[in-house]
Amino acid sequence: MRYRFLAAFLSLAAMAAAAQSPSQASAASAPVASGRRAAIVEAALGQRDELVEDILADELSAMLLAKGLGVQGRLELPKGDGKAAPPDEERVSRLLAGLDPRGADVIAAAFYLALDDELTIQFALYDPAVKVVLGGTIARARKGLTSFASAQEAVGAFGPTVERYVQGSYRVDPPSGLVERIVVSGPRDGSRVVIVDRDFGTVSGGRLVVPYTQYPLGTTVPITVSKEGYHTYSRNVTLSETQSEIATPPLRRETRVDAGLRWSVGQAAGIGFGARFHLKPDAVFLGVEAYRYLEPDSLSRRVVRHYDLGASAGSYVLFPYSSPFRVHISVGAGIVVTDVEGIEGKEYVDYYVALGDPTAELRLGPVAIFARPDLHYALGVGYNLLGREWIRTPYGLPPITIGARLSW
C-alpha cells in the first residue's frame, strides 16, 4: 500500500514538473528529424524495479524524440538456456547480439542496479546492423522521492552520445557480402543448436536468433539440432541471404521401449504379446514374446493347447529411423509347450531357434504395424512333438505374424 502511494505521489510530482517545463514537453513531442528509429531495452543487474524501469523508459523516450529519433517501443532481451543475461555477462554487445531489433536503426539500452536508496545506471547506444556499441555512459541516481529528477539527470548525461549518433559521428555502414542475422525455426523448445562447431544455445518459443557471426554470403555450414531423448538432426545449409532463416523439422523422439499385440495366420485361435528394449534407439533391440493358441485335434476331438515363449536380438537393416517404412531382422530361441485336453501330465516341449524373422514395419506416429514370416526351426530334442524340422502351419507354410506396437 505504501509502495502504491509513493508511486502515485511521484507521478503527480512528475506531472507538475512537466507543467512547469513547457520546453521539455515541446521537445518530447518534436517531430522526427533524422528519419531513424530507436528502440529501448532495460535490464536489471539485480532485483528488478518496475517503477524505475517505467521512469527510465519515459525519460529515454522523451530524450530520443527530442534528439530527432522516432521511438518504436521497448524490447525484451532474449531468454533461454545458453543466452547471455545480466549480471552473468559483462559485455553489453553480447547481451544485445541476439536481440531482434524489429526494424529499429539503433537501440538505447539501460542496465540498472538498485541497492538500498542508490541507483547505478549503465547506458549504451547499440547499432544492431553491425552488432557494435557506439557509445555509452554510467550515471548514478537516488531512489525515493527524487527518483524522477535523478533519472532525468542520468538520461540527460546520455544525451550527448545520442546526439553524436544523430549528427553522423557514430554512423557505421554495415559490411557488404556478409550474413547479418540467422534465425533457426522449427525445432522443439529446448533443442540445442550448433552451427559449425559453435553452440548458440537452445530454442525458445519455436525459434532461435543466432548472434552476428559474419559468415560470407554463399557459405555452406553444417547445422546440428539436438535434445535429450530425441534423435539428432544434422544437415548442411547454404547461407544465401543477409537475413537467413533455417527451417528444420521437429526432432523425432527416440524409441527406448515398445510393446504390442500379435496374431499369427495358421495359428489363428490365439493371441500374443511382445515387448522390445532398444539398446540403441530405433536401431538395435532385445525382444521377448509370448503366444498362446489352440488347435483342435480332428481325430480325438480334443483341444491341443500351445504356449510359445521366445527371446530374440535384432537390428533394423533397411531405411533410416525417419522413414515411415522400415525392415528389421532378428535371431533368437524359444520353446513351445503343448498339452492335450484331458491328458494331464503329458506335456510336449519343443525347443527351436529363430533364424532371421524378416519384419516389415509401417510407422504411424508412436504406433507401428508389422508383418513377418516366423522362420523357426525345431531342434527335436527331449520329449517333443514336432521333431527336427521347420515349424509350419497345416498348409505347409511358415506362420505369418501380424501385429501392432506402441513405442515410447
Image (tube, rainbow, N blue to C red):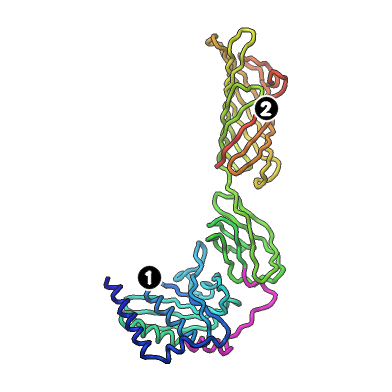
Query: In this view of the protein, which residue sits in the foreground, 372 or 19?
Result: 19
Q: What residue type is labelled 2?
A: Ile
Q: Which three-letter amino acid code belongs to the residue tagged 1?
A: Gln
Say which residue label 2 marks. 400
Q: Quadrant of residue 264?
A: top right
Q: How crowded is mark 2: few (under 14 residues within 10 Å), some or many (20 or more)?
A: some
Q: Is residue 348 left or right of residue 18?
A: right
12 vs 330, nearest the viewer: 12
**Disc 1 packing (10 Å; few <14; some 14–19; many ≥20):** few
Asked whether residue 99 is drawn in magenta, I would say no
Q: Residue 47 carries which label?
A: 1
Depth check, mark 2 against mark 1: the one in front is 2
Dot 2 lies on which element? strand
Spot the residue most to the top: 300
Report how far apart the C-alphas of labels 2 and 1 lie in the structure: 68 Å
Residue 194 pos. (x, y %): 60, 61
127 relative to 319, above or below = below
The label number, if any, that marks residue 72 in the structure image: none
On the picture, is 84 further left or further right than 374? Answer: left
Assign a secondary structure to mark 1.
Answer: loop
